[in-house]
C-alpha cells in the first residue's frame, strides 16, 4: 500500500489540530479535525482558496447558527430549518463547494447545551483552528514539487504508452491484457491533465512564490498533447485498422513508422532532460518528410483498394507526428534560451 503526500499531510493536519485544541483547552476538538480534513487540497493555492471560501461561508453559517440559537433554540427541527436555509443561500451565492464544512459548523454551534453562547463560540473557533492548521501543514510539510512530479508522470506514462504503440500493429498482446493496459493508460493521461491544470494554476496564482518559466509550461503542455494524440492513434488502430484487412506489407509499413515515431518521441524527452547534445543536426525536416512519405503510401492503398479505415489511422498518425515535431521545436527553443 502506497501512501501519497496528501494522505500523510491530512493525518498530520488532523493530529496537530487536535493537539493545538488540547493545549488551548478548547472543547469539541473533533470539529477541528473535521475542518482540517475538508481543507487539505492537492495544491497550496487550492488550499488557500479553500480556506478563504470556507472562512466566508463559515462566518455566514455562524451568523445563521447564532440567530437560530437565539430565536429558535437548539431542538432538531430548528437545526434542520437553519441548515436548509443556509444551504439554499450558499447555493444562491455560488458557495456550494464549502457547504459540507459550513453545515458542520452550524451543527457544532447549535448543538451547544442549553443555549450556552460561550460553548457555541468555542466550537466556532475550533473550526478555524482546523482550517489554519491544514493550510500551514500544506505549505511547510512535503510542499508539492509540481515540476518533478509532472516529469515523473510523463516518463512513466510514456513507458506504458510505448509498449502499447509498439505492439498495436503486430497484435502480440492478448485482447484482455491490451484492454486493461488501454484503460490504465487512459486513466493515467486523464490524471496527467489534472496534474498539469494544478501546475499551471499554481504558476499563475502563486507567481510571486513559485517563479516558473512560462516557456517551460508551454513545453509541458505539448508533452501532454503528444501523449494524448499518441493514445488516440492506438484507439484508432484498435477501432479501424484491422477492419481494413491489411496485407503483410501494409502491416510492416505501419509497424516500422510507428517504431520510428516512438524512437523520436523518446529522443525528444531525453533532449528536454539535457541528455541529448543540442549541437546535433536537426532532424525536423527529415522527420516530417518521412511521415509525409508514409502518408502518401497509405493514401495510395486507399485509392487502390478503398481502405478508408486505413486512411483514418494514417491521418491520426500524421497528427501524432505533427505534435511530436512541435514538441521538438519548443524543447529546442526552451533549451537554447536556458543555456
Image: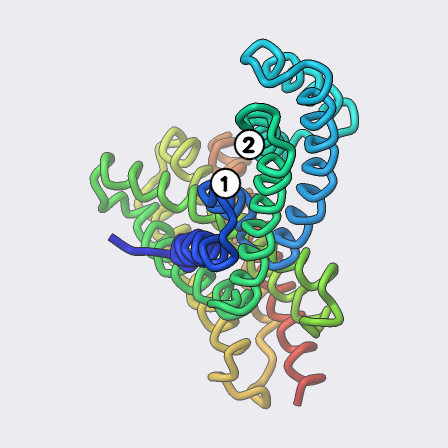
Residue at the image point whose x is 65% and y is 12% from the top: 81
Query: Is the residue marked by circle 1 packed among few (<14), some (14-19), or many (20+) residues within 10 Å?
Result: many
Q: Are marks 1 and 2 in contact (CB under 8 Å)?
A: yes
Residue 101 is drawn in which quadrant?
Answer: top right
Instruction: Answer with mark 1 or mark 2, whichever residue precedes in sequence.
Output: 1
* Residue pointed to by mark 2: 108
Task: Tell me, yes or no, if residue 120 can be seen here.
Answer: yes
Q: Secondary structure at mark 1?
A: helix
Q: Going by the image, does 128 lie left or right of 11?
A: right
* In-front residue for pair 128/291: 128
Q: Going by the image, does 260 lie left or right of 2?
A: right
* In-front residue for pair 171/101: 101
* Residue 303 vertical position relative to residue 262 in the rendered view, above or below: above
Question: Residue 261 location, x and y as percent?
Answer: 47, 61
* Residue 4 vertical position relative to residue 331 in the rendered view, above or below: above
Q: Going by the image, does 70 lie left or right of 298?
A: right
**Label of residue 9 in the image:** none
* In-front residue for pair 205/102: 102
* Residue pointed to by mark 1: 31
Residue at the image point whose x is 61% and y is 48% from the top: 128
* Residue 115 vertical position relative to residue 158 in the rendered view, above or below: above
Q: Secondary structure at mark 2?
A: helix
Task: Tell me, yes or no, if residue 295 can be seen here.
Answer: no
Residue at the image point whose x is 54% and y is 61% from the top: 138
**Distance (Cα) linking label 1 and label 2:** 7 Å
* In-front residue for pair 242/219: 219
Amino acid at each position: 500500500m502506497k501512501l501519497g503526500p496528501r494522505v500523510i499531510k491530512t493525518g498530520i493536519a488532523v493530529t496537530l489540530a487536535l493537539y493545538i485544541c488540547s493545549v488551548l483547552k478548547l472543547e469539541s476538538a473533533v470539529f477541528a479535525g473535521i475542518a482540517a480534513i475538508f481543507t487539505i487540497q492537492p495544491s497550496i493555492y487550492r488550499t488557500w482558496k479553500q480556506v478563504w471560501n470556507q472562512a466566508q461561508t463559515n462566518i455566514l453559517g455562524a451568523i445563521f447558527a447564532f440567530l437560530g440559537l437565539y430565536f429558535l433554540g437548539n431542538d432538531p427541527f430548528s437545526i434542520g430549518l437553519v441548515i436548509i436555509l443556509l444551504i439554499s443561500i450558499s447555493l444562491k451565492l455560488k458557495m456550494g463547494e464549502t457547504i459540507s464544512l459550513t453545515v458542520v459548523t452550524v451543527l457544532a454551534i447549535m448543538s451547544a447545551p442549553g443555549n450556552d453562547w460561550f460553548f457555541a463560540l468555542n466550537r466556532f473557533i475550533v473550526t478555524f483552528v482546523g482550517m489554519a492548521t491544514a493550510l500551514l501543514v500544506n505549505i511547510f510539510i512535503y510542499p508539492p514539487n509540481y515540476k518533478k512530479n509532472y516529469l515523473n508522470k510523463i516518463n512513466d506514462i510514456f513507458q506504458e504508452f510505448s509498449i502499447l504503440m509498439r505492439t498495436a500493429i503486430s497484435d502480440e498482446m492478448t485482447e484482455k491484457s491490451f484492454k486493461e493496459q488501454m484503460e490504465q493508460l487512459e486513466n493515467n493521461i486523464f490524471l496527467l491533465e489534472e496534474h498539469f491544470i494544478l501546475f499551471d494554476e499554481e504558476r499563475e496564482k502563486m507567481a510571486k512564490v513559485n517563479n516558473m518559466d512560462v516557456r517551460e509550461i508551454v513545453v509541458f503542455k505539448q508533452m501532454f498533447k503528444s501523449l494524448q494524440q499518441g493514445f488516440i492513434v492506438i484507439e484508432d488502430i484498435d477501432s479501424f485498422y484491422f477492419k481494413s484487412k491489411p496485407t503483410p506489407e501494409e502491416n510492416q509499413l505501419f509497424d516500422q513508422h510507428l517504431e520510428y515515431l516512438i524512437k523520436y518521441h523518446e529522443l525528444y524527452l531525453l533532449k528536454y532532460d539535457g541528455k541529448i547534445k543540442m549541437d546535433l543536426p536537426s532532424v525536423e525536416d527529415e522527420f516530417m518528410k518521412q511521415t509525409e512519405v508514409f502518408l502518401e503510401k497509405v493514401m495510395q492503398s486507399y485509392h487502390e483498394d478503398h481502405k478508408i479505415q486505413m486512411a483514418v489511422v494514417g491521418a491520426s498518425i500524421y497528427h501524432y507526428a505533427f505534435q511530436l515535431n512541435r514538441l521538438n521545436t519548443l524543447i529546442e527553443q526552451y533549451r537554447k534560451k536556458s543555456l
